[in-house]
């Protein structure tokens, strides 16, 4: 069994990650690191054995296989590098890093440590997404030509750090707005479905007044064999997720909890737009995380997926004059 520690015990860790770890027969969380006394107490109340204020305290007291980094994005890169220096594998919430030079820093550090960095790309493991992917891979709609992804929210995620309320709308901490928040998921889903890297990016953004944060975005990603069109907003009247995979022999549509292909329709237990933490998706993802920690090749595949997400989003910001 692998042993690990969660770094940053906020809403994502407590509500999305920990419930999955508590059920796992392959991974055990033995500690948390958080600067907040309140959060360290909350972890201990959940029967996590130890809680520390810093990574140095953790390293002095624990022998680990990995850490799971759940802090705001701007803190990721230095925490990942510190973990690799300690010889730990890393699971890290998205966005993995905010700036492209940091990707190369992490590549070098992985090579030196012989450890891997795996991003939390949990949308791949939603049951309705997995079903759509399986249908696509089976050839039922032929060659994929077009992907449409629509994510509607009426605000950014309500979960906040009490010491940094509203950090998702702070570009210094979050990197940007909805592109880094929901766009990251859309990019890796489209890339996975086409099984190709995009060759061209086009983007238009709407900015929150008097800020440098995007609250609405349209992306067009051109792949060698097709196109992905992505619409994201924090300005909707209600939460909703819709996806269409169009091939040369048919199409698959997802409308939150309903998947339709031709005359057949299937309803799933939970809509894609319900909640923000999705512990059941994280639980399904953990099996591949364990495999990635045991295989540098598989771990690097997941890392490079995150590198593509960052490249696309940074290109979109460049086009909007927000580099």
Image (cartoon, rainbow, N blue to C red):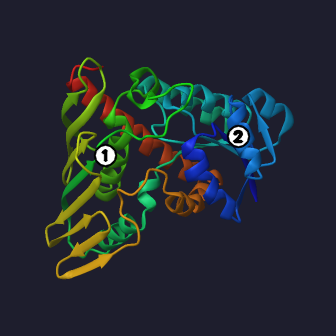
In percent of width and height, residue 158 lies at: 43, 40
Q: Residues within 10 Å of mark 1 (few under 14, many from 20)?
A: some
Answer with left or right where residue 112 lies relative to residue 210: right
Residue sticking out furthest to the bottom:
263
Residue that label 1 marks = 197
Q: Is residue 147 above or below residue 171?
A: below
Residue drawn at (55%, 27%), measured in percent from left and top?
75
In percent of width and height, residue 259 lies at: 28, 71
Q: Secondary structure at mark 1?
A: loop
Q: Which mark is residue 88?
A: 2
Residue drawn at (34%, 66%), measured in percent from left and top?
133
> Which residue is more in the foreground, 56 or 44?
44
In percent of width and height, residue 249 lies at: 14, 73
Q: Is residue 127 above or below residue 236?
A: below
Q: Which mark is residue 60?
A: none
Residue drawn at (72%, 32%), measured in percent from left and top?
37
Q: Secondary structure at mark 2?
A: loop
Q: How many marks?
A: 2
Q: Is residue 24 above or below residue 186?
A: below
Mark 2 → mark 1, Cα distance in angstroms: 29 Å
Answer with left or right where residue 133 lies relative to residue 107: left
Q: Is residue 249 above or below residue 319?
A: below
Quadrant housing the N terminus? bottom right
Q: Residues within 10 Å of mark 2 (few under 14, many from 20)?
A: many
Answer with left or right where residue 191 lies relative to residue 157: left
Residue 30 showing in the rendered view: no
């Amino acid at each position: 069994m692998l042993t690990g520690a969660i770094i940053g015990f906020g809403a994502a860790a407590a509500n999305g990650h920990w419930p999955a770890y508590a059920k796992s027969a392959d991974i055990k969380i033995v500690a948390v690191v958080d600067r907040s006394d309140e959060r360290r107490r909350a972890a201990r109340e959940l029967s996590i054995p130890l809680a520390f204020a810093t990574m140095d305290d953790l390293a002095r007291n624990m022998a680990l296989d990995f850490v799971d980094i759940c802090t705001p994005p701007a803190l990721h890169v230095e925490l990942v590098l510190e973990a690799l220096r300690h010889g730990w594998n890393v699971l890290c919430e998205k966005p993995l890093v905010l700036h492209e030079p940091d990707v190369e820093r992490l590549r070098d550090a992985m090579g030196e440590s012989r450890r891997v960095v795996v991003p939390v790309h949990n949308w791949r493991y939603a049951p309705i997404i997995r079903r759509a992917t399986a249908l696509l891979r089976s050839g039922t709609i032929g060659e994929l030509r077009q992907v449409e992804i629509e994510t509607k929210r009426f605000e950014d995620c309500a979960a906040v750090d009490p010491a940094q309320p509203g950090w998702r709308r702070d570009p210094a901490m979050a990197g940007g707005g909805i592109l880094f928040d929901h766009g990251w998921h859309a990019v890796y889903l489209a890339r996975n479905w086409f099984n190709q890297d995009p060759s061209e990016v086009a983007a238009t953004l709407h900015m929150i007044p008097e800020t440098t944060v995007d609250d609405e975005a349209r992306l067009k990603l051109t792949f060698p064999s097709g196109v992905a069109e992505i619409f994201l907003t924090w300005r909707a009247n209600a939460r909703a997720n819709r996806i269409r995979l169009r091939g040369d022999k048919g199409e698959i549509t997802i409308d939150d909890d309903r998947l339709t292909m031709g005359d057949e329709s299937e309803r799933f237990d939970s809509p894609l737009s319900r909640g923000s933490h999705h512990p059941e998706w994280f639980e399904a993802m953990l099996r591949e995380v364990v495999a990635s920690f045991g295989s540098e090749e598989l771990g690097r595949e997941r890392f490079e997926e995150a590198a593509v997400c960052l490249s696309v989003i940074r290109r979109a910001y460049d086009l909007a004059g927000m580099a």
